[in-house]
């Protein structure tokens, strides 16, 4: 019984330290880093290989729809709301046909 009580007390104290203001929390980036510059390099008619060279390997390749690639990037910063960026690239007949999401090609 004493060991159990000691265990419960220890767990409560350790759990209380998670909100301690002096504790350093890491920024956690996940996925493909997306930028407007890389999306601006994409042009209709590019091959999947050319798109992959510019954007990197997609984080999600739909096994049921090989013509859709999804690039997703999340950033979890300590004490802030996580940010999410998403770009979906669609291919028609093996060529880039459409770009959807948070970044779109800008007209130059």
Image (cartoon, helix red, strand yellow):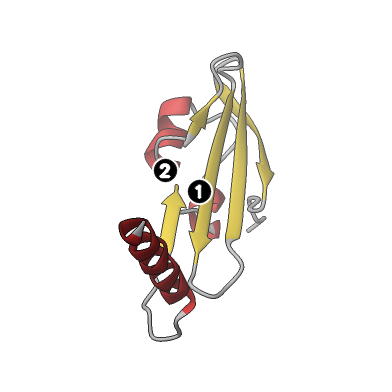
Q: Residues within 10 Å of mark 1 (few under 14, many from 20)?
A: few
Q: Nearer the viewer, residue 105 or 63?
A: 63
| Secondary element type, mark 2 | helix
Please state the horizontal and vertical placement of residue 26, each as a whole percent of the image: 38, 68
Please state the horizontal and vertical placement of residue 50, each as a whole percent of the image: 42, 33
Please state the horizontal and vertical placement of residue 2, each as a whole percent of the image: 33, 61
Quarter occupied by the C terminus: bottom right
Answer whether labels 2 and 1 touch (C-beta < 8 Å). Answer: yes
| Secondary element type, mark 1 | loop
**Residue at point 60% right, 14% down?**
93
- Residue with the mark numbered 2: 54
User: Does the rendering let one see residue 26?
Assistant: no
In this picture, is 107 found above or below 22? above
In this picture, is 43 found above or below 49? below
Q: Nearer the viewer, residue 69 or 42?
A: 69
Q: Residue furthest left?
A: 3
Please state the horizontal and vertical placement of residue 67, each as a whole percent of the image: 59, 20
Residue 41: numbered disc = 1
**Residue at point 49% right, 69% down?**
77
Q: Nearer the viewer, mark 2 or mark 1?
A: 2
**Residue at point 51% right, 51% down?**
73
């Amino acid at each position: 019984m004493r060991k159990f009580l000691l265990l419960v007390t220890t767990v409560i104290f350790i759990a209380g330290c998670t909100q301690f203001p002096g504790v350093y929390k890491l920024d956690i980036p996940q996925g493909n880093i997306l930028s407007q510059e890389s999306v601006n390099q994409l042009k209709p008619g590019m091959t999947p290989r050319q798109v992959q060279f510019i954007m990197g390997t997609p984080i999600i390749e739909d096994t049921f729809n090989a013509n859709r690639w999804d690039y997703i990037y999340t950033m979890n910063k300590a004490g802030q709301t996580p940010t999410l960026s998403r770009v979906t690239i669609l291919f028609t007949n093996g060529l880039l046909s459409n770009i959807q999401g948070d970044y779109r090609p800008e007209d130059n």
